[in-house]
Image (tube, helix red, strand yellow):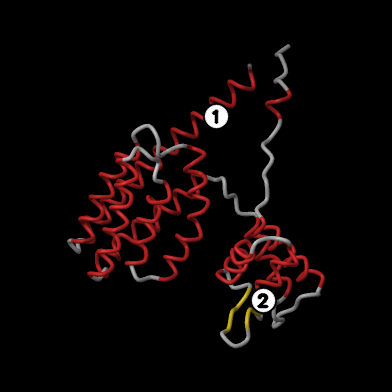
Amino acid sequence: MPKPPPIIAQLSPIQLQKPADLIMRQIRNLLASGALKAGDRLPPERELASQFGVGRGHVREALRKLEFYGVLQTFPQSGTIVASLGAGALERLISNLLDLDRDDIKALTETRGILEMHSAQLAAQRASKAGIAEIKDALDAFRVEVEAGRPAVEEDLLFHLTIAKSAQNPVMTSLIGLMTPDIIRLHKVSRVCEAGRAQLALQEHIKIFRAIAAHDPRAATRAMSEHVRLIKQQFDEAALQMIASQRSQALA
């Protein structure tokens, strides 16, 4: 008979929940119970942070996500209000947001790739002189970190966010911004910016910047497409290495 696998191989990593997700769950429960209804006004961030026992940044992150997806609406004079959708629809929408697999590297990189290529194309068409200068500043900041031998994960993504801003499409910028924290975390876990990868990324960034500065949409799309392809390849290789390492540890 085949030897049964060691028990350790049957265990799964514990997923720690972020404070923002826990806040969203509580809001979902209030909607489900009827304690919170469409049109109700939420307390100010400061009061919510005190009640939840967390920093205001966590509250702001949760409210920002719920507002982006239409669960909440913010008005200058009225504050933050629950949207006019039915409680059931709002509860289901929050559930869908919480069920997103933020560790799905393939899904994140595929979605990011689509957005990044289109943002590069639009930036090449629409970027102003000031916008191009901002992209250059972000490129220079990335260059400094890379040449100093540091991973430069945040500077890398800031470069991409600056391009998205220059594309002058607020929805696209928001979508890329929402993905950024999870991409940063996966970059660090997978270490895709190590082992010389950052040096290659710098050269790719330079090509992207030059195409945008030249207002050449086709060249910008092509340069970003190649950059995204190499990022995906790097993630795939890192994922295979992590799987091999986990199997090795399980059999040890």
Q: Position of residue 198 (x, y in %)?
A: 34, 40
Residue lying at the far top of the rendered structure:
1
Q: Position of residue 124 (x, y in %)?
A: 25, 64
In the rendered view, would you say 249 is above or below 63? above
Lateral position of residue 48 relative to residue 230, left or right: right
Total numbered labels: 2
Lateral position of residue 133 relative to residue 2, left or right: left
Which image quarter: residue 68? Answer: bottom right
Depth check: give the residue in front, 178 or 61. 61
Q: Position of residue 87 (x, y in %)?
A: 73, 74
Mark 1 residue crowding within 10 angstroms, few (<14) / some (14–19) / many (20+): few
Lateral position of residue 232 relative to residue 69, left or right: left
Query: What's the residue at 73%, 11% (across, down)?
Result: 1
Lateral position of residue 213 relative to residue 235, left or right: left
Residue lying at the far bottom of the rendered structure:
77
Amino acid type of the residue tagged 2 in the rendering = Pro
Residue picked out by circle 2: 44
Residue picked out by circle 1: 243
- SS assignment at label 2: loop
Q: Position of residue 244 (x, y in %)?
A: 53, 25
Query: What's the residue at 70%, 81% (across, down)?
Result: 41
- SS assignment at label 1: helix
Which image quarter: residue 158? Answer: bottom left
Mark 2 residue crowding within 10 angstroms, few (<14) / some (14–19) / many (20+): few
Amino acid type of the residue tagged 1 in the rendering = Ile
What is the CA distance from the residue labelled 2 to the residue labelled 1?
45 Å
Query: What's the residue at 76%, 71% (across, down)?
Result: 31
In the rendered view, would you say 211 is above or below 46? above
